[in-house]
Amino acid sequence: MKIEYILLIILMAVVTYLTRVSFLVLFTSKNLPTIIYRALKYIPVAIFATLIFPGIFAPQGKLDLSLTNPYIGASFITVVSLLIGKNAILSIVLGITSLVVLRYLL
């Protein structure tokens, strides 16, 4: 392995560590406003939506809201199954199965 790659990995690790530990060091002894705490609770949902929605609504890189988009139908079936049944494993299996069926039919 080239020395540049090793140095690059070490520098990326240092930058990652510093950005994460800086919040612990700077804000441990300070009380943040409650609005900040409420806003921080939405970060995981926002990241999840950022990762999932492009795959559903733009599977080929462009917006596809048509009825022939099998990802929209499969995600709808998965969400409804999860809301009704409250069983995550069953909903995932149902979502994958519905995606396969919808891709075959459409």
Image: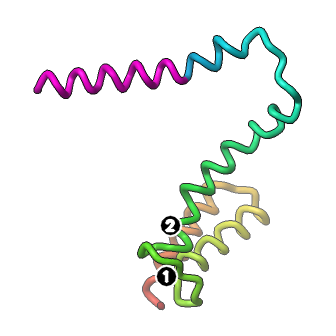
Give the mark nearest the N terminus, 2 or 1.
Answer: 2
Looking at the image, which residue is at 81% across and 32% down?
A: 37
* Type of amino acid at the residue the image marks with label 1: Val
- Which residue carries the number 1 mark? 101
Q: Quadrant of residue 8?
A: top left
Q: Is residue 17 above or below residue 71?
A: above
Of all residues, the one furthest to the left in this rendering is 2
Question: Of 4 and 57, which appears nearest the observer?
Answer: 4
SS class of the residue under badge 2?
Answer: helix
On screen, residue 67 above or below 75: below
Determine whether 37 is above or below 60 in the image: above
How far across and how far down the image is residue 75, in percent?
Answer: 61, 70
Q: Looking at the picture, how far across and down is residue 106, in whole percent? A: 47, 90
Mark whose residue sits in front, 2 or 1: 2
Tell me: 34 left or right of 16.
right
- For mark 1, give the secondary structure: helix
Q: Is residue 17 magenta?
A: yes
Quadrant containing the N terminus in the rendered view: top left
- Residue 16 within the segment the image draws in magenta: yes
The quarter of the displayed image where residue 94 is located: bottom right
* Residue that appears at 43% across and 72% down: 61
Q: Magenta-highlighted stretch: main secondary structure?
A: helix
Q: Which residue is mark 2?
A: 55
